[in-house]
Image (tube, rainbow, N blue to C red):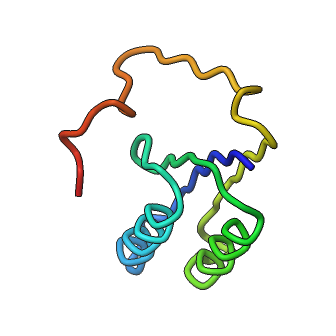
Amino acid sequence: MYVILVYDIAADKRGARVSRRVFKICKKFLTHVQKSVFEGQLSVSQLKQLTTELNQWIRDDRDSVILFKNRNKTWLIKEFIGMDKSEDTSNIF
């Protein structure tokens, strides 16, 4: 299934650590598109593993993750306004 993941981590005392960890988990499974946005094709088991790992770090009262899921990427029309960062390789970590 094709997944677009967006997250928002609260900027508090522990937020920077949570944000770094969430970024690393997402990067393991998906392609980094921009800031806190990731996308990619995942199997059902990969999606379950991703959500399990994220649940260990996301604080229910402060942080949020939104998963947009679609069975097929071809049903998605992606339009860019401004720079298409998916082609930008200057920010590789």
Q: Position of residue 55 (x, y in %)?
A: 65, 79
- Quarter-wise, where is residue 58 in the image? bottom right
| Most distant residue in the left direction | 90
Q: Position of residue 28 (x, y in %)?
A: 46, 67
Residue 54, compared with residue 11, is above or below; it is below
Instruction: Write the residue at 71% across / 61% down.
Output: 43
- Quarter-wise, where is residue 71 in the image? top right
- The residue closer to the viewer here, 2 or 23, is 2
Instruction: Write the residue at 40% across / 46% down.
Output: 35
Query: How many numbered marks are there?
Result: 0
Question: Left or right of 48: which side holds 91?
Answer: left
| Most distant residue in the right direction | 71
- The residue closer to the viewer here, 45 or 68, is 45
Question: Left or right of 46: which side holds 75?
Answer: right
Instruction: Write the residue at 59% across / 22% down.
Output: 78
Q: In which quarter of the image is the C terminus?
A: bottom left
Instruction: Write the residue at 66% across / 57% down.
Output: 42
- Quarter-wise, where is residue 15 in the image? bottom left
Q: Position of residue 46 (x, y in %)?
A: 66, 69
